[in-house]
Image: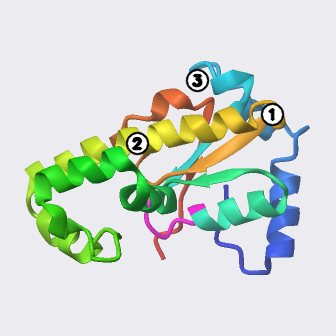
Amino acid sequence: VRTDFPFGLHDAHRLFTTTFSWKSTAWNILLGNSHAHKPLYHMKLIAITGGIGAGKSVLSKVLRIMGHCVYDSDSNAKRLMDNDITVRHKLIGRFGIGIYTPNGFLDREKLANLIFGLDDNRHFVNSVVHPAVGRDIEHWASRLRHSHDIAFVETAILHESGLTHMFSALIQVKAPHE
């Protein structure tokens, strides 16, 4: 999927619908991935993944314009770290109450200082946040199952998060090295 569009979103939408229309061979091959696990609730759940700056967000925006539901793992992980009681309890248990600001939000700078370069802390945070995101995706998908045949999840760290089993197919977004 090309995401280095040298034109506007309207043109990107036209390119995307032309390249991946429901009747196109490429789209049907993608959705008919015989190696995929059983989709949640008989709904196709498609992962959008790729490196930093590859264009995952551009593709997600095009999909939203087309009327599709897209779950943004990064923003929802931040929401869960701020609001999920279990996540908060585990982070406070490991790093102390000071990991949250007086306003109740995660002190992201303090957390960054605690996890960068310290593998044990990073692994701990991932072991808390990734399962919470997985549960949140399942909850989100369960609300969509009766009204949607397909939904998308944007995630930069699909394989590292251990969530690959949730998806019917994968869209790997790549950007040119230039």
Secondary structure, magenta segment, majority class: loop
Q: Which quadrant, please, contains the N terminus?
A: bottom right
Labels 1 and 3: the sequence-earlier one? 3
Residues marked 2 and 3 touching at CB (< 8 Å): no
Residue that badge 1 annotates: 149
Quarter of the image for residue 39 reads top right
Labels 2 and 1: the sequence-earlier one? 2
User: Residue 88, percent across and down?
Assistant: 30, 53
Residue that badge 3 annotates: 36
Depth check, mark 1 against mark 3: the one in front is: 1
Query: Amino acid type of disc 1?
Result: Asp
Rounded to the nearest angstrom, the CA distance separating label 2 from label 1 is 24 Å
Q: Give the residue drawn at x 15%, y 50%.
A: 93
Is 43 magenta? The answer is no
- Label 2 sits on a secondary structure element that is helix
Residues marked 1 and 3 touching at CB (< 8 Å): no
Quarter of the image for residue 6 reads bottom right
Magenta extent: 51-56
User: Residue 45, percent across and down?
Assistant: 65, 35
Residue 45 seen in render? no
Q: Name the outermost residue toward the right.
A: 23
Residue 99 seen in render? yes
Query: Amino acid type of disc 2?
Result: Ala
Front-most of residues 143 and 31: 143
- Mark 3 nearby-residue class (10 Å; few <14, some 14–19, many ≥20): some
* Colouring mode (rainbow / by chain / secondary structure / one colour): rainbow
Rounded to the nearest angstrom, the CA distance separating label 1 from label 3 is 16 Å
Q: What's the mark number on residue 132?
A: 2
